[in-house]
Image (tube, grey):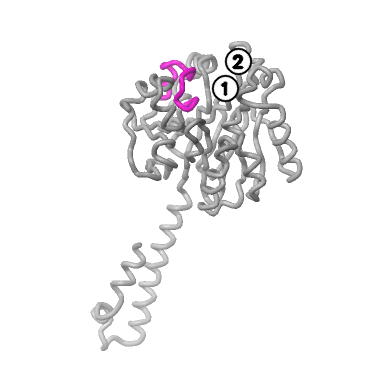
Amino acid sequence: MEVDKVARRLTGAQLNDYAPHHYSTSKMITFIRLISVLLIAVVLSACQKKQGSLTWTSIDVNIPTRQGDAHLLTMNGRYALIDTGPAEAAGKLIKFLQNQKCSRIDFIIITHGHSDHYGGLVPLLKSGVKVGCVYFNPPSASHIANEPWGCSNGEIAEIRTELQKRNIPLKAIDKDTEWRLGKDAVMQVICVFNGIDTPVGRTDINDTSAVLMLTHKNIKILFAADLNRAIGDCLTTNCPPGMLQADILKFPHHGAESFPNDSLFAAVNAGTIIVPAPKELWLSERSARGRQLTKEKKVYINGIEGDITVVSDGNKFSVSSAKQSPVSADR
């Protein structure tokens, strides 16, 4: 650290070079005050840079037989979580939060009603982590009946019960909902539908996903949840030019087929792609189109590389992974 370097330069014989013995006491005091001011300036500058940064970690909540989404956002001491992964991987999520010393999450967003996105919520609540608010549009009874493999009335009821026990508000997500992580970071809803009243008629639960755009000054991140082809194509056709454009894309539907047509990815035009998927899924035939689409991009798969962390200062960003091994998109 720069402070340590300055301190080392002022120790031992080097200090004598700056303050020879014939210096008067008053000159020495002036000298020490000057150095103190410089040290304080360095520390304050470092703190300001840290306070202005936004960190997003795509947590590896995958298991070999199942994918999951869980994304922790941190800025200025505030924490937000987008999705909680499946119940089977809740231990991985809780351990990650503990390692980050995250004992309170200001708000949690569940993008849609499939258990690989909401399954970790109840175990997280039971772990003792404090939660300020949960945003979630539970699926309709008819949707649950049509997709029993992805969700259940019992699981949704348990979420409601555990939230009520803790007096945690359950709030709906609509097109006007937005969240502020700091003065220069805002997340807005690009689209969210109930699967019944939509521009394309009735859809599956994946197409009820809340698609979110996080803007940190000049950096944009699109969280596409499990967006599928029907609503994805609708967005591509109807969104104003540039509305979907982002620097980073959280790949929809874990990279597995049924995600939107190629035109959506052209509209987003992200240079960096984060894929929350196990290795087995990403390298399977189901993800062949995803691998082809992203072969010229910087691609990170958290089920291969471990937790993926993005740090943004609002003008540029860096990406690192737990295993520090970049993944080639053509794998």
Residue 137 % position (x, y): 66, 28
Residue 13 % position (x, y): 25, 80
Predominant secondary structure, magenta span: helix
Residue 245 lies in the magenta-colored region: no
Q: Which of 147 and 54 is in front in this view?
A: 147
In the image, farthest residue toward the top:
201
- Residue type at mark 1: give it: Asn
Give the left or right position of residue 312, taking residue 77 as reference: left
Residue 321 % position (x, y): 39, 43
Q: In which quarter of the image is the C terminus?
A: top left
Q: Nearer the viewer, residue 71 or 117?
A: 117
**Identity of the residue drawn at 67% across and 24% down:** 139
Q: Is mark 1 on a helix, strand or loop?
A: helix
Quarter of the image for residue 140 reads: top right
Give the left or right position of residue 109, taking residue 282 as reference: right
Residue carrying label 1: 206
Structural distance between the alpha carbons of marks 1 and 2:
8 Å
**Identity of the residue drawn at 63% across and 20% down:** 147
Q: What element carries label 2?
A: loop
**Eyeballing the image, is 31 above or below 156?**
below
Quick check: marks 1 and 2 in contact, CB under 8 Å? yes
In the image, farthest residue toward the front:
65
Q: Give the range drawn in magenta.
A: 252-268
- Residue type at mark 2: give it: Thr
**Identity of the residue drawn at 62% across and 15% down:** 198
* Badge number at residue 203: 2
Residue 256 % position (x, y): 46, 23
